[in-house]
Amino acid sequence: MSRSEIEVRGLHKSFGDNEVLRGIDLEINQGEVVCVIGPSGSGKSTLLRCVNLLEEPTKGQVFVGGTELTDPDVDIDAVRRRIGMVFQQFNLFPHLTVTENLTLPQRRVLKRDKAKAAAVAAENLERVGLAEKANAYPSSLSGGQQQRVAIARSLSMGPEVMLFDEPTSALDPELVGDVLAVMRMLAEEGMTMMVVTHEMTFAREVADRVVFMDDGVIVEDGTPAQVIGNPAHERTRHFLSRLLDPAMADVEEETSDQVGGETED
Amino acid sequence: MTDTDIPPQPSRSLQPKKKGLTRRQKRSLSRGVQYAVFVAAVIAFAVSADWDRLKNQFAQADIAEQMFPDVITMALKNTVLYTLSGFAVGLVLGMVIALMRLSSVGPYRWFAGVYIEIFRGLPALLIFIFIGVAVPLAFPGTEIVGGTYGKVALALGLVAAAYMAETIRAGIQAVPKGQMEAARSLGFSPARAMISIIIPQAFRIILPPLTNELVLLFKDSSLVLFLGVTLDERELSKYGRDLASTTANSTPILVAGLCYLLVTIPLGFVVRRMEAKAQEAVK
């Protein structure tokens, strides 16, 4: 439990003049589940995308499993094989069946043979409870099923770390539960997970740590009981009250530093 | 404004009196006139045309008969062969140009842009003359592989590549950005992701415009007329024209034309079906 699996040091990221991340330091240990919460445009998705270098950091370092991703000479494709990524919009390959979505990356990237790839795919579909959809096309599945297939696709590559970018935000409310159940299962199996989410119940029950971000910096970092149950900062309290009881929020003036909203969609 | 929520007008005489025809009457009158003009034009043509002469010129059964089976086994076969080889060259070259156009290397983008502008801007006929006449004169001793077939494939391919490159580029850009991100985060290299994930999806998107391009090429293959070809290398247009001049009759032109339609009409139908299907998939 002590080895740090993800380490972020002095991370800055700007899109043009818009500085989205202003100095992030974060360490996530092996087997730890960390939920990143915060308002739209706070930079939480950008931070997650910097961890597997889908966004190139402007300044700072990112280590995963001891390898520095921000080193220009590192084989980024090799490092990414160890990092699973789950997107808000699922991003399944629509021209392939569910099974092919799981086997093609294994065969092309890991050079596994057909039988081995199919066995791994079947096993992971079983884990997310979708074995009977093996031959369906993504378009015939519900959002929740697509997201579970996307998780199974990542798992088929045998990752050591899983990143989740608002995995339930594009789902109808009644489909959220199935996806969260799969994520909870992974957490219990000891997967190292970094989850950007608005699901406070999940964060409270499953996360080992909760990180609250606002305006490109980490405001609070602690156990769910501390950050969600008893936040130390006014900004955290304010965010949580709006999130947990949206109907009670007052109409607010837009502040000038809330630029543009979520840049990463 | 509906009249249900307005109180009844005190006097009907306040409303402006409608003069002349109502809207519905005007519409049916206009349609009636259009039908009448059409019917009159058809009758005028049917009466004034010299049917015997037309039949003699365009539909002589014995001349048509003597074209078979050559018009199919040789002329149509060559047309199809020229078209397909030109399409193959155009597709490969177009793919290369499209990828260059999307490259992060400046000179590649620049070269692709210039190529597309030049070959879309020049008449196909000029390219044929260039390949057929200018190249052998400018580079004596060079032989284009495949003789006439090679020349035609090259000329058609050079023109088609410019159009196809733009189509393929649009197709690649129409694949959602998330697809590349998902592939990269699974560990695909950029090239692998392009080949395994992006291009197969792009081709699904551009299948209808590519088939359209095939129809255009099928017709452009008639430009072979301007290359010197042997008797056995003639395609529909040249074959039809040669026969028309030896028989001093236009029937061969009509038969050759029908052979084109035999291919282009079903292909056009296929394109519309694919487009409708793609529309449905989007919904």
Image (cartoon, coloured by chain):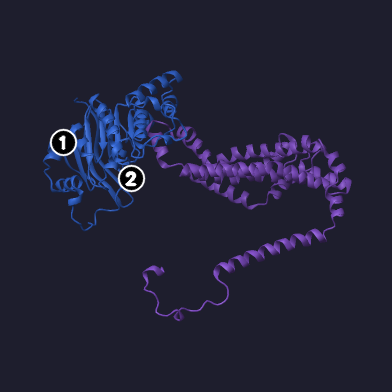
Chain colours: A blue, B purple
Please state the horizontal and vertical placement of residue B160, each as a whole percent of the image.
63, 44
Question: Quick one: which residue is furthest to the top in this view?
Answer: A115
Query: Tag on residue A264?
Result: 2
Q: Position of residue B179 (x, y in %)?
A: 42, 38
Left or right of residue B91, residue A50 in this image: left
Do the residues under discs 2 and 1 have CB atoms within 8 angstroms?
Answer: no
> Is A3 rendered above or below residue A210?
above
Residue at disc 2, secondary structure: loop
Which of the chains bears the disc numbered 2? A
Query: In this orientation, which residue lies closer to the viewer: B255 or B22?
Result: B22
Label 1 SS: helix
| Local crowd size for mark 2, using a 10 Å CA cut-off: few (<14), some (14–19), many (≥20) | few
- Quadrant assignment, res A211: top left
Q: Is residue B143 visible?
A: no
Q: Earlier in the sequence, mark 2 or mark 1?
A: 1
Give the alpha-carbon distance from disc 2 to disc 1, as whole Å.
Answer: 26 Å
Q: 10 Å neighbourhood of mark 1: few (<14), some, or many (≥20)?
A: many
The C terminus of chain B lies in quadrant: top left
Q: Is residue B114 left or right of residue A89?
A: right
Front disc: 2 or 1: 1
Q: Horizontally, is B195 left or right of B83 in the view? A: left
* Quarter-of-image position of residue A33: top left
Residue at 77%, 44% (x, y): give it.
Answer: B256
Taking the spot 83% from the left edge, 42% from the top edge, the residue there is B64
Q: Amino acid at mark 1?
A: Pro
**Subunit under mark 1:** A
Q: Quadrant of residue A164?
A: top left
Quadrant position of the N terminus of chain B in the picture: bottom left
**Amino acid identity at mark 2:** Glu
Q: Position of residue B171 (x, y in %)?
A: 51, 43
The disc placed on residue A224 is 1
